[in-house]
């Protein structure tokens, strides 16, 4: 084999591997979508289309804004490593982790101050949906922490950063889920 043939084979293998990784990630998102759609529809089955007046609208809007801001920082982290800017990549990953922790803290505050309980139909839906979503945010924070750890040790580059890309896509997916959960839990009120 010549050097050119070996290089072409390696490029073909890397392209195939990237395609398989992306397909696997999108299939995972599809399967998770069924879970989240089931949760959202169960809210209407359990509690109808009314939202209790004691839902903390201000806190709901605040944690939603924080999570959306975290998507912006996550995007900037991915864009930075794609152009080889490690310092900016690491800074934005830290910001994303911090914002994710603030979101989870906001959910914890919401849980501890909610005037409805898990035995109430709306409370059952609320605590289940926010709890499962928060568990996904926590797993995302863990993955971001791993990406930060590996990135700090020089693991990613402009040419090779699938780990970053996959984790950031997961983070965006979790954020998009919340974009649907927020109105379902806080805003919909058809009496």
Image (spheres, grey):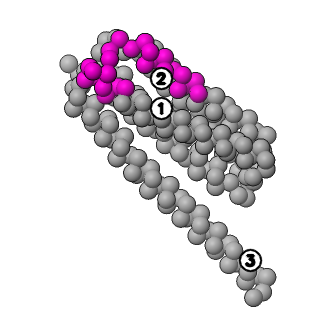
Please identify, in this view, whether the residue under mark 1 or under mark 3 is nearer the observer. 1
As measured in the structure, the alpha-carbon distance from the residue carrying label 1 to the one carrying label 2 is 8 Å
Check whether the beta carbons of the residues at disc 1 and disc 2 lie within 8 A of each other.
Answer: yes
Q: Which residue is mark 2?
A: 107
13 relative to 68 in the view: left or right: right
Task: Classify residue 80 by image quadrant.
Answer: top right
Q: Which residue is mark 1?
A: 134
Tell me where residue 47 appears, x and y as whole percent: 23, 25
As measured in the structure, the alpha-carbon distance from the residue carrying label 2 to the one carrying label 3 is 50 Å
Task: Classify residue 38 by image quadrant.
Answer: top left
Tell me where residue 25 appears, x and y as whole percent: 50, 55
Residue that appears at 33% across and 41% down: 37
Residue 138 shows up from this direction: yes
Residue 112 lies in the magenta-colored region: yes
Residue 175 lies in the magenta-colored region: no
Q: Magenta segment range?
A: 101-127
Q: Could you classify mark 1 by the number of other residues whose Cα lies within 10 Å: few (under 14), some (14-19), or many (20 or more)?
A: many
146 relative to 2 in the view: left or right: left
Check whether the beta carbons of the residues at disc 2 and disc 3 lie within 8 A of each other.
Answer: no
Which numbered circle lies on residue 7? 3
Determine whether the residue tagged by mark 3 lies in a helix, strand or loop: helix
Task: First in sequence, mark 1 or 2: give its number.
Answer: 2
Query: 36 or 188: nearer the eye?
Result: 36
39 relative to 110 in the view: left or right: left
83 relative to 162 in the view: left or right: right
Task: First in sequence, mark 1 or 3: give its number.
Answer: 3
Look at the image and tell me in which quarter the N terminus lies: bottom right
Residue that appears at 47% across and 32% down: 134
Residue that appears at 41% across and 47% down: 32
């Amino acid at each position: 084999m010549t050097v050119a043939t070996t290089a072409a084979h390696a490029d073909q293998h890397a392209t195939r591997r990237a395609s398989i990784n992306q397909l696997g990630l999108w299939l995972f998102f599809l399967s998770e979508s069924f879970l989240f759609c089931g949760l959202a529809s169960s809210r209407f089955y359990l509690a109808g289309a009314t939202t209790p007046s004691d839902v903390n609208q201000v806190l709901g809007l605040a944690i939603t804004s924080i999570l959306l801001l975290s998507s912006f920082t996550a995007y900037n982290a991915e864009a930075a490593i794609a152009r080889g800017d490690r310092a900016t990549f690491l800074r934005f990953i830290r910001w994303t982790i911090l914002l994710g922790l603030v979101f989870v803290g906001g959910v914890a505050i919401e849980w501890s101050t909610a005037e409805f309980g898990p035995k109430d139909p709306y409370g059952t839906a609320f605590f289940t949906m926010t709890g499962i979503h928060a568990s996904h945010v926590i797993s995302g924070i863990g993955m971001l922490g791993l990406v930060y750890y590996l990135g700090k040790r020089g693991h990613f580059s402009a040419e090779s950063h699938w780990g970053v890309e996959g984790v950031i896509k997961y983070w965006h997916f979790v954020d998009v889920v919340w974009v649907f959960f927020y109105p379902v839990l806080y805003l919909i009120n058809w009496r």
